[in-house]
Each structure stands twice: as structure tokens, then as C-alpha cells.
Amino acid sequence: MAAALVTLTGLSVVGLAAGFVLALTAQTSADISQHVLVAVFATTLNLFAHSLMMFYLLGKGRAVKEAMAEHGLQGDYMSRVARLRGPVFSRATVAMVLTMAAAIVGASVDVQVMPPWPHGVAAAAAVVLNVYALWAEVVALRGTSRIVDEVNHRLIAVPVSTGD
């Protein structure tokens, strides 16, 4: 599942970058239409991917917490999970907000309410911040996976009570 989430988020970031390049190289209205199509699809995919990533990390944290409580395990696992999740939640949220802002401003450019430069600046910032968020997500997924493996290893070592 983690690999699928990274792939989905990565594809959305590539799509945002492709939309940005299409806008920079556009010379005709057909080029602008292609930019809009790619950018709207990438924006939708991006919001979906980051949201799924955050829910996945919440679920992993909850699974670790429940396993610890159910089996009486001690350790700093939850604080480690929280430290890994923190950067993802803040960076991905800001990346999503900036991506949405770029799309909204882009719509304003399309109807000639705003000049193109604010859209370009917001789009460039969104691409950069999405790469930064993706990196944080990869780090969090790797770290969380190690924590889950540690907890599972400890669970295997815990003797099972038969209730006698």
C-alpha cells in the first residue's frame, strides 16, 4: 500500500510539473487547453494522494497504539510515529492549500480577472512544496514501517496467554 501511495503522489507531482512546463511553453489556445487539462487532473490527483497518505499514516499509528495496548508493550513507539507524521501533515497540508490556490488563481487568469504572474508564482511554489512534502512522506513511510516491524517482532516474542 505504501508503494502505491508514493507512486500516486509522485505521479501527481510530475503532473503538476508537466502542467507548469506546458504553461511556460504554450503558444496557442490549444496549448493552454492542454495545460488546463493536465493541471486540473494533476491537482485533483494531488489532493486525493496527499489525503490518502495522511489517512494511511493515521491508520498505521492507530494500529501501533492498539497493538501496544492489547499486548501491554512498553516503548516510545507512539512518540516516534508522531514525530514522523508531524512533518507530513504540515507539509502536505500546505502543499495542498498552495496547489488549490494555484488552481483557483489559474481559473481567474483564464477568465481574465487576474494577470498570469500570480498563478505562475503560486504554481511554481506548489510544485516545489509538493516535492518537499513527498520527501517527508517517503521518510515517514519508511520510519513507520520500521516501527511496525519492531512492534511485530516484539509481539512474536510475547508469550500468548491461554487464560487458564
Image: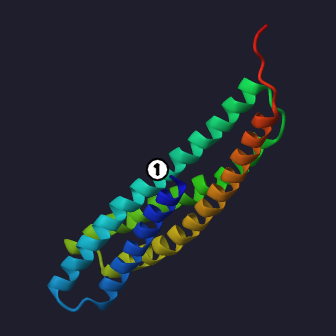
Quadrant housing residue 49:
bottom left
Q: How is the image coloured?
A: rainbow
**Residue occupying the point 58% across, 69% down:** 132
Q: In the image, residue 154 lies at what x, y percent? A: 79, 38
Q: Can residue 53 be spotted in the picture?
A: yes
In the rendered view, does 32 fall on the left or right side of 90? left
Which structural element holds mark 1? helix
Q: Is residue 113 visible?
A: no
Residue 11 vs residue 36, the one in the foreground: 11
Q: In this rendering, would 49 be left or right of 106?
A: right
Instruction: Give above or below for 49 relative to 40.
Output: above
Q: Is residue 69 above or below residue 143?
A: above
Left or right position of 108 against 136? left
Question: In the displayed image of the protein, which residue is found farthest to the top?
Answer: 164
The number of discs equals 1
Residue 148 position by quadrant: top right
Q: Which residue is mark 1?
A: 52
Foreground residue among 157 and 30: 157
In the image, residue 93 lies at what x, y percent? 52, 55
Seen at 84% across and 33% down, the residue is 74
Residue 135: percent from left, percent from top: 60, 67
Q: Amino acid at mark 1?
A: Leu
Q: Residue at x 82, y 41 (%)?
A: 76
